[in-house]
Image (cartoon, rainbow, N blue to C red):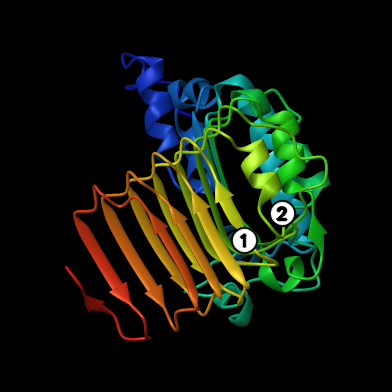
Amino acid sequence: MSEAGDPLDPLPAAILADVLGRVADTGDLAACRLASRALLAASYHCPRVSLSAAARARRRRREGVVGDGGAAFRSAAANFAALIGPYLRSLALDASEGHGFPDDAMWVEEGEFDEGDDLHLTTGESVASWAATAAGPALREVDIADFWPQSCWRKAEALPVISRLCHNLVKLKLKNAWLSVARLKIMPTLTHLALEFIRLDDEDLSALNRCFPCLETLNLIGVGGLKDPKIDLPQLKTCCWEVSNIPRSLAIHAPKLVYLDLKCVHPEILILDIPSVSTLKLTIHKLGPTVQADGLVLLSKRWMSPTSRRRHAG
């Protein structure tokens, strides 16, 4: 830092903290802390932190750093959470760097990361390392994309740990993981949930319905492990559901739902109890013998495709 006066001193700390929260790479954030006393002070109030395992792996390689990159990445998340504590509102951890599918981790194929290192972000221990700090109750948004080659075969406790330690969470997105729902607690503040490329130990979605009763937005993209799943959420308004396997039945009970985008293969039974829906996008490879759609009196836009080819129906 220069001995001269810091040109950023006149700016309010809250503005500087907000600017730092928009810096996507934590390496750049660390450089900002070294460049200015004002930014250093504001960094302790930074509301958002985003960590990319690919970016850190490339930086470690340039610097000639050896060792367990996975452990270093997980430690970095815990350190930032402890550093910022109650001021942290949003935390994003990305170990995927994929392009469309969970196993397309291109940065691994290019040698950016050693698969022998342990980079499993959704374990209970990994999540607790940052959620058990003062940042846990302060967080409003959490976004974790795990490393699929290591996470797909190991059941993880991310959901129960987050429900226990992040009491005020509003938005949660988890990607590329096998998730347990054992000891999952009710999260009354959670209104947005996205699960992508997830194996979920909740065959009928009863734990999801019970523990996330105030969801308004739900995205289930490529969620496996389901058998006769039923969404039953009284506050749900928007839902995107791409069913990855072939359950015998699908049901949605959501009296306030106004937007539904549902993609599935061949459910024998499809029940849509969505009387308030105004936009319906329905893609089904083959309709089963039982389809029940109650209400739909407010429907103004609909797209329906009984085959792999989508056509506009109204």
Q: Which mark is residue 95?
A: 1
Q: Nearer the viewer, residue 160 or 144?
A: 160
Where residue 305 appears, x then y in whole percent? 32, 78
- Along the polypeptide, which appears first: circle 1 or circle 2? 1
> Which of the 4 image quarters holds residue 10?
top left
Image point (50%, 78%), residue name: 289
Secondary structure beneath dot 1 equals loop
In this rendering, is residue 137 above or below 21? above
Query: What number is the disc on residue 70?
Result: none
Q: Are marks 1 and 2 in contact (CB under 8 Å)?
A: yes
- The amino acid marked with disc number 2 is Leu
Asked whether 115 or 241 is in front, the reply is 241
The image shows residue 84 at horizontal and vertical percentages of: 60, 26
Residue 53 position (above or below residue 111): above
Q: Hey, what amino acid is under mark 1? A: Ala
Q: Nearer the viewer, residue 128 or 278?
A: 278
Q: Residue, x 73% and y 47% (percent of image)?
A: 158
Question: Would you place residue 47 above or below residue 194 in this image?
Answer: above
At label 1, counting other C-alpha atoms closer than 10 Å, the crowd grade (few under 14, some 14-19, many 20 or more) is many
Q: Is residue 16 visible?
A: yes
Q: Quadrant of the C terminus?
A: bottom left
> Label 2 crowding class (10 Å Cα cut-off): few <14, some 14-19, many 20+?
many
User: Is 240 on the left or on the right of 164, as rendered?
Assistant: left
Labelled disc at residue 121: 2
**Residue at x 51%, y 26% (from the top left corner):** 40
